[in-house]
Amino acid sequence: MKKSSIFGIVTIAIAIAIIICTYGSASTYGTFKDAANNSGELHIIGHIDKQKEVVYNAIKDANYFSFYMRDTIGNERKVVYNSTKPEDFDMADKIVLVGKMDKGEFHASSILMKCPSKYKQDKLDVKADAKKASI
Amino acid sequence: MTIDYQGEHLFPGQLGQFFIVLAFGSALFSAISYYFATTNTNKLDTSWLYMGRIGYFLNTVSVIGIGSCLFYIIYSNLFEYHYAWEHSSRTLPVYYIISSFWEGQEGSFWLWGFWQAVLGNILIWRAKSWEKPVLTVIALSQVLLSSMLLGVEIFGSRIGSSPFILLRQAMEAPIFSRPEYLSYVKDGNGLNPLLQNYWMVIHPPTLFLGFASMIVPFAYAVAGLWQKRYKEWVQPALSYALFAVMILGTGVIMGSLWAYESLNFGGYWAWDPVENAALIPWLTLIGAVHVMIVYKNTGHSYFTATFLTLISFVLVLYASFLTRSGILGETSVHAFTDLGMFWHLVVDVVVFAVIAIGLLIIRWKELPFSKKEEETYSREFWMFVGAVFMALSCLQLVVVTSIPVWNAMFKTSIAPPTNPVTLYNVFQAGFAVVVTLLTGVTQFLKYKKTDVTRFFISTLLYVVCAALITGIVVYLTGVYKLKFVFILVMLGAIYSILVNGKVLADAFKGKIKLAGSAVAHIGFGLIMVGALISAGTSSVVSQNTSGMDYGAEFDKANSSRENVMLYKNVPIKMGDYSVTYVGDSIAAPNHYFKVDYKLLDANGNIKEEFILKPNSQYNNKMGLVSSPDTKHYIFHDLYTHISMAPLNVMQAGMDLGHDAEVNDDDNYNAPTIHDIAVGDTVPYRDGYIILEKLNKTVHVQNIPIGANDAAVGADLKIVSHGITYEAEPVYMVKNGSEFDFARKVDDAGLKLRFTKIIPAQNKFEIMVYDQPEGKRPYIVMRAINFPFINFLWSGTVIMIIGFLLSIFRRNKELKTV
């Protein structure tokens, strides 16, 4: 067998391994229900429930932040994040959590904010400006 | 219904829009002319060539025209234009106006088009016989880039996005029905505070010059296939490929320096899709450069060289699709959102992919595949292997970063890995082991055939040396606590540095032309060493648990409990440091928090003291935006950033003179009352207070003291956490009534009143108000130690020097051959 064919096979094998590994390590988007039935970490997309309390008290514990989120099928759970309250949390609407369920609470290892205004045209702001202008 | 709007400056926008259309038209004209110039069989007919050149020059002029109009609009604060309103504001200094110029997608497309115009002109001047086919490709790319800016409606769908759209065209609001709406638009949105950093002035132009210059080797490869000049294209393309790799690499590192200096994630590299997007084409082109050299020297690896060169530019376009189309959606914090150009960007990728693949298929039978196999002990074979591994490492990045694309294509909903950093680190480290080892091993191999015994002896000798040094380094830095693959990377990198060091030493003895690659490889090795140690053994100094368990952290990127809260003037022990939040300084819009670090020795003496000033600013759009501050040492960095500061601290800084006096007592706990004599001491929660003496000649401003009046000040000394303050509350009798004037010591969280004199006992009544914990100023911060990070930065500089030397060498060859 030619050396280059052997090397070619090795290359293809590594390429396939990469794809399988990617698929294997890939997580899933799920709901709180899925998280409760699953011991591993997964992604949950949802909306922050702004009616319920958002706890961050640096004096008590600088590394404890909790809030309530409603997932895509409407279930609501308390979310605990062992770090500071993310800076743009108040602006956020939709968020993506990564983490797992623990005793009825969702422990997030990361929170990704999808802020409507961050990189997008800020239409809301203009309307507010416009209102001010017309008063 | 037309409204006669007042105060708008429509001319610069109309002129700019005219230039956009002209740029598109002239690029198209140039591409077509160059195409016919290339296919024209009559060698004497130069009319197509001249038309192509005229088109290209016209395009260059238009691109400069677009830039000038846009800059004028932003510089003159013409907020009737959406781009200026969105990205700039009146208070922005000129150098940040430059950054706001390319904050938006349109500006960055312009930047890309500008560099491509410049490169095209250089090629018209220098490419000689290659000009026609190469410029055909570049002009075509210019057509597609200009079309991104068109913003014209064709058949009901908008093509491109123009930077000259007016505010009232870009959005709908009732205010735009008023002719004088502009008088209400007082200021623009301003530049994202995170981009207000000097790196953001030079990082985007460098990065986009890198992206733009990737087209040159691509164009040469296409020209080589098209004109059947299979052997010749490599020679001129090599210098340009080296240039592209050098500039893109510099741009990427500048981006990570920016992240390190102004972002809060605590590091310089996070494998974010946007970072990956820039790295992907770099990896394939660096692979391409190596096999191009192989092909030039031995005639082997023609297909790999061509393929990697072609795919690199297609990947540049793919990367720009990833970051600009909005497809990354939930997976990236940085990516741009959709400007409605999804399919436009797809078309861009597809056009060039089809050109590349189509030409390869058409010419397949003629391609100069080498008949003979490479020798096992030959440099060309192992360089080829290295290039393939580069491509594989790129494949891994592409496959994982593109998960949202797979979801869109196959209607699946796979989420990215929960811990992408670990996944990338481990995978890329695996490839780095092979690549770094090969950059060393190939130095002992010769092209064509090598003496096997000598090869094994010298390779082994250096491997043993490298293993010894690696052992020491790994032990001293703590890298041994990491996964085994990272130790192997360290071995590979040190081996590469040693071997290439030897080559460099030889180069100084005469083989000077070999210096370029040796220097670049040493730089790359240092980058690996620096990245491994600094990222792998970085330790969170502010972690509540003081255990040094950093091995686990590198594997698991998100560990928690890394933040520490500091009350103002209350020192906290953090690692070897005693850390105190000592004060604030404000340079609007930034609020700097002064954090004092004291390094104490075993006896508690101060060995070193310095102040870091991490800052935050409150932004209406984004909330609290913080940037770190870092103490740089030669062998490590101490990085500190504010995770959170109570808004009242920020506001106290921002609007001084706020009506703070109203019900001020609410800010304090109920007072404690003490009857004391001069010299007595009163304890309180954070220290003690001494009544030093009474001051009978005290004056309270604007209050005259009459004959029957009296005013007495109590000179108090307050000692809190080793710091001494002074305060003098005043007791006054005026016109038969008692008054007192409280004094505050904000830094100690105290308010003091002198409320009564008790002559019988010669005692004085002092009321002590201390602030409850929540009302006292505090910050929450995180501090990280990055050891040996300077290897990373110095490695980068060395690698750039290596690239420069190589470019000079290849250019010289070009002249002599």
Image (cartoon, coloured by chain):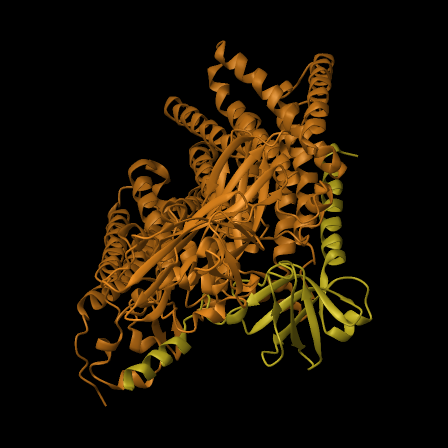
**Quarter of the C terminus of chain B within the rendering:** top left
Q: Is residue B608 above or below residue B750?
A: above
- The front one of B632 and A75 is B632
Pick out the residue farthest to the front. Answer: B760
Q: Which residue is drawn at the image coordinates 46% and 53% (left, top)?
A: B747
Q: Which residue is drawn at the image coordinates 66% and 75% (left, top)?
A: A68
Q: Is residue B354 visible?
A: no
- The front one of B224 and B27 is B27
- The front one of B515 and B672 is B672
Q: Is residue B650 above or below residue B376?
A: below
x, y percent for residue B92:
29, 57
Chain A pictured colour: yellow
Chain appearing in orange on the rendered image? B
**Quarter of the N terminus of chain B within the rendering:** bottom left
Q: Which residue is drawn at the image coordinates 39% and 75% (left, top)?
A: A125
Pick out the residue farthest to the bottom. Answer: B1
Q: Residue B266 vs residue B466: left or right?
A: left
Pick out the residue farthest to the top. Answer: B509
Q: Is residue B109 visible?
A: yes
Question: Where is residue B192, by image quadrant?
Answer: bottom left
